[in-house]
Amino acid sequence: MAVIISNDNLKEGVGKTTLNLLLANFLHEKLKEKGKKIILLEPDQFHDSITRIREKELELFLEMVEARYEDENGKDSFGMEQKDDAIGMFNNETFGVVSVQSDEMVSTIDMIASECDVIIIDSPAGSLALEENKVYSLIDYLFVVFNMGGSEEESTGDFIEIYNKKVRPIREEMGSDINVYGILNKFKTTGKDFMEFKQRMENGEITKKFPDIKFLKTELPYSFQLKREPTTTRLNNIVNILEPGDVIFNYCHEVYNIIYNKIS
Ligand SMILES: Nc1ncnc2c1ncn2[C@@H]1O[C@H](COP(=O)(O)OP(=O)(O)O)[C@@H](O)[C@H]1O
Ligand SMILES: [Mg+2]
């Protein structure tokens, strides 16, 4: 059975998709030699759809392979067989993307969980409020993405409250463990909001306010590298050049270490 994870929040723009894509790329790179399969599951995403980006990437890849093939073999020889091989190659090189209607999430997860090792759910904003508790109760590791400042803490608090009220009891009843982490993302290290939050972490105020949340050691400040572009693989190139000590590397590793034992 696949381990199901998700970076999530009620709010749009906090970095859910960015972190989900980053982990998908990292876990694929890290685990491909062991034959492990990673699938990013995308429910009902209308704009900025990863599924659509992925289709374009495949198209470009096929055009490139076809052009190269024809260079080497003369015109008109790139047929179905060559195309299938190229698609196979593309699929091996990157994690899978599965698009699904939100009312078919549970049945889809049921179906793919036995065929892959990690499922990363990239929810649209606000989905926890949309009675999708059944889906949430399937998530083994929930990473709540915290942004700093304004009403961020309040809406993140709402998200955690809904989770605790609606999802936690379902998981408890199923006898499943509950793993909810916090990840600080997209803040300015020198910003007042971040510094205040850190201070409140140190004096125990945050633990008191969010007693069920374990915060990751690694925090992800605003960085040019994480500025998302319309590609599912650019972060993969980043993952490949990361070195220990780099916060993005540390983040990926920290999550990897947390979930590693659950990957069969
Ligand atoms: N740590 C970060 N540093 C810089 N930009 C970030 C970071 N995290 C997210 N972003 C940017 O913030 C914007 C919103 O992120 P996105 O992942 O689409 O959010 P969501 O999926 O929560 O709506 C994107 O332009 C993305 O590149
Ligand atoms: Mg998103």
Image: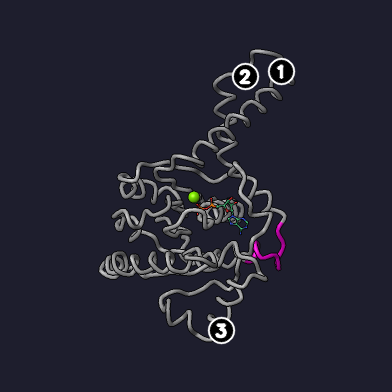
Q: Residues within 10 Å of mark 1 (few under 14, many from 20)?
A: few
Front disc: 1 or 3: 3
**Which residue lies most toward the front here?**
150
Relative depth, front residue between 143 and 14: 14
Residue at x-position 35% and y-position 57%: 128
In the image, 121: left or right of 202? left
- Residue type beneath disc 2: Phe
Query: Does the CB distance between marks 1 and 2 fall below 8 Å?
Result: yes
Q: Is residue 156 above or below residue 117?
A: below
On residue 73, the disc is: 1
- Residue type beneath disc 3: Glu
In the image, 223: left or right of 16? right
Q: Is mark 3 within 8 Å of ligand 1?
A: no
* Span highlighted in magenta in the image: 242-250
On residue 100, the disc is: none
x then y, percent, for residue 8: 45, 59
In terms of sequence position, does the residue under pointer 1 or pointer 3 come before the other? 1
Q: Is residue 107 above or below residue 249?
A: above
Relative depth, front residue between 70 and 45: 45
Front disc: 3 or 2: 3
In terms of sequence position, does the residue under pointer 1 or pointer 2 come before the other? 1
- Residue type beneath disc 1: Asn
* Magenta stretch: includes residue 243: yes
The count of marks equals: 3
**Which residue lies most toward the bottom here?**
203
Residue for badge 2: 78
Give the secondary structure at mark 1: helix
Residue for badge 3: 202
